[in-house]
Amino acid sequence: MYQKTLVMTTPNSPFVRRLVTVTEPQLQSLAGLLIDAVDGGASVSFMHPLPVPRALAFWRGVANGVASGERALFVAEDAEGIVGTVQLILAQPDNQPHRADLAKMLVHRRARRQGVGAALIQAAEGAARDRGKTLLVLDTANGDAERLYARQGWQRVGVIPGYALLPNGAPCDTTYFYKVLGD
């Protein structure tokens, strides 16, 4: 297994790397990042308030997927710790070996609009290419990061109204995107 580091272009900005194992301190940081996203109103599968044990249980499941090779996990870190993450779900049905899902893009509120999301996406896309994946898909709550994905060359497929709930319980629409990976 390799650990690839992508240095971002602005001084003192976070760097992105792939975690091939997830330590307990990293689990704690990822749980804090997830709680920050939910506290900020992001529709990322959890309701507010998100208890620490629930957030840790989620990340332990992700760590198991990383250990088994079913997922690739990327983190963006700065001097204070983990400020962003994204997952690449590599395990797909037998008839879809060419594709992967991009999931759980999270950027801490203190690090938004600094290129963290773009760097995470680029790292995940590079890993997908390295694994021979030619198609990526993702879904996001309407308004959440749609501009970011479009700027990174993702194609908007459509919207499913009322697909999920925001952390406060209000319904939200979900937008689906895909990206065909070239060389």
Image (cartoon, rainbow, N blue to C red):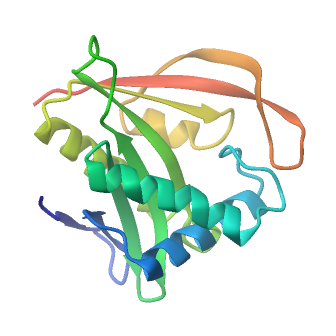
Residue 129, image quadrant = top left
Residue at (48% x, 64% y) in the render: 84
Q: Is residue 26 depicted above or below 168 in this figure?
A: below
Residue 63, image quadrant = bottom left
> Of all residues shown, which one is farthest toward the bottom?
79
Residue at (16% x, 27% y) in the render: 182
Residue 78, image quadrant = bottom left
Q: Is residue 10 depicted above or below 120 in this figure?
A: below
Please identify the quadrant where the N terminus is shown.
bottom left
x then y, percent, for residue 48: 83, 57
Left/right placement of residue 172 relative to residue 144 reads right
Looking at the image, can residue 64 be seen? Answer: yes
Is 28 in front, or is 180? 28
Left/right placement of residue 41 relative to residue 80 reads right
x then y, percent, for residue 43: 71, 44
Please identify the quadrant where the C terminus is shown.
top left
Looking at the image, can residue 119 be seen? Answer: no
Is 122 in front, or is 163? 163
Residue at (32% x, 54% y) in the render: 66
x then y, percent, for residue 53: 68, 68
Left/right placement of residue 132 relative to residue 61 reads left
Q: Is residue 144 depicted above or below 16 in this figure?
A: above
Is 24 in front, or is 114? 24
x then y, percent, for residue 20: 25, 63
